[in-house]
Amino acid sequence: MRPVIGITTYVEQASWGVWHDLPTALLPYDYVRAVTTAGGRAVLLPPDDLDADVLDVLDGLVLSGGADLDPALYGAEPEPLTVTRPERDAAEVLLARTALERDLPVLGVCRGMQLLAVGAGGRLHQHLPDTLGHESHRPAPGVYGEQEVTFEPGSRIAALMGGDRSVHCYHHQGVADAGSLLVTGRTPDGLPEAVEDPAKVFALGVQWHPEVVRDKRIFGALVAAAGHSSG
C-alpha cells in the first residue's frame, strides 16, 4: 500500500456550477499531484480541532499554504494587512504538534513552514515589504517571485536540492524567529526560506511552493520517510 499522506485544506468562500459563495474546504490540486507523483496516497484534511486522531491512519502530513496565522499564536497583535483563518489555526496547530510529538513525517509549505516555526516557539514578520523594503517575495497578485536560496551545508534541504538554488515563492509574511528549529535556507535579503528539525525522522518546512513544479525531491523525501515510518 502506498504511504498515506494527509494534506490540510484551505477554508474559503468558493463558487462552482450553480453554487455561489459557499464556505468550502478546498486545496490547489498541485498538492495532490505532487504527493501521488512521489508515490504517496493523498488524503485531504478539512479543519477539525476536536482531536488529532486522524494521525493514527496517516503515514505523513503536509501542512499546506494559505492565509496568515493569527499573531496571537506568537504573542503579537494583528497588523492591518494580516488576514487570518482561525478555524485552520486551531486545527493545524493541534495536528502539527501531535505529529511532531509522534515523530510522524511532516512537510510544511509556505504557511505550513510558518506554522512549524511558530509551533516551535518562533514568530513572524507580518508584512515583508515593511520589514525588507521590497515586494520580491510576492511581486503581484497571483505571480510567484523567483528567489535564489543559500542552503546550509550538511542540511537535509541542501542534500535534496543539490546545486539547484532557484525557487518560486508567494508570501507577504515570513519567519522572523524559527524558535527551536534550524534555519537551513535563506534568501539574499536574509529571510529564512527553509527550516528543519534534524532530530526528527522528517520535519521540514519550505517557504516556497514545490508542489507547483511537482518537485519529486521534496515530496519524494516525505513519502519515503512516511514509507519507512509505516513499515
Image: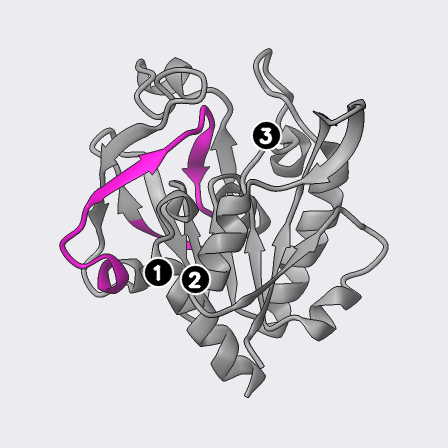
Which mark is first along the chain, 1 or 3? 3
Q: Nearer the viewer, mark 3 or mark 2?
A: 2
Q: Residue 104's spot in the image, x, y percent?
A: 57, 71
Q: Quadrant of residue 9?
A: top right
The answer to whether residue 117 is seen in the rendering is no
Kindly report which numbered mark, 3 or 1, lies closer to the viewer in this rendering.
1
Q: Amino acid at mark 3?
A: Asp
Q: Which mark is residue 37?
A: 2
The foreground one among 22 and 94 is 22
Magenta residues, start to end: 158-184
Residue at 55 percent across and 76 percent down: it is: 2
Question: Whole-Å distance between the Cαs marked 3 and 2?
Answer: 28 Å
Relative to 183, say whether 143 is above or below: above
As drawn, the label of residue 216 is 1
Residue 83 falls within the magenta-colored stretch: no
**Left or right: where 204 falls relative to 56:** left
Q: Which mark is residue 164?
A: none
Label 2, residues with CA under 10 Å away: few <14, some 14-19, many ≥20: some
Mark 3 — residue?
68
Q: Is residue 7 above or below residue 81?
A: below
Report how far apart the C-alphas of labels 3 and 1 lie in the structure: 27 Å
Q: Amino acid at mark 1?
A: Lys
Q: Nearer the viewer, residue 29 or 159?
A: 29
Residue 111, x across and y down, in percent: 53, 39
Residue 191 spot, x, y in % from top left:
32, 34
Colour mapping used in the image: one colour
Near mark 1 (Cα within 10 A), the count class, few <14, some 14-19 or many ≥20, is some
Quarter of the figure with the N terminus? bottom right
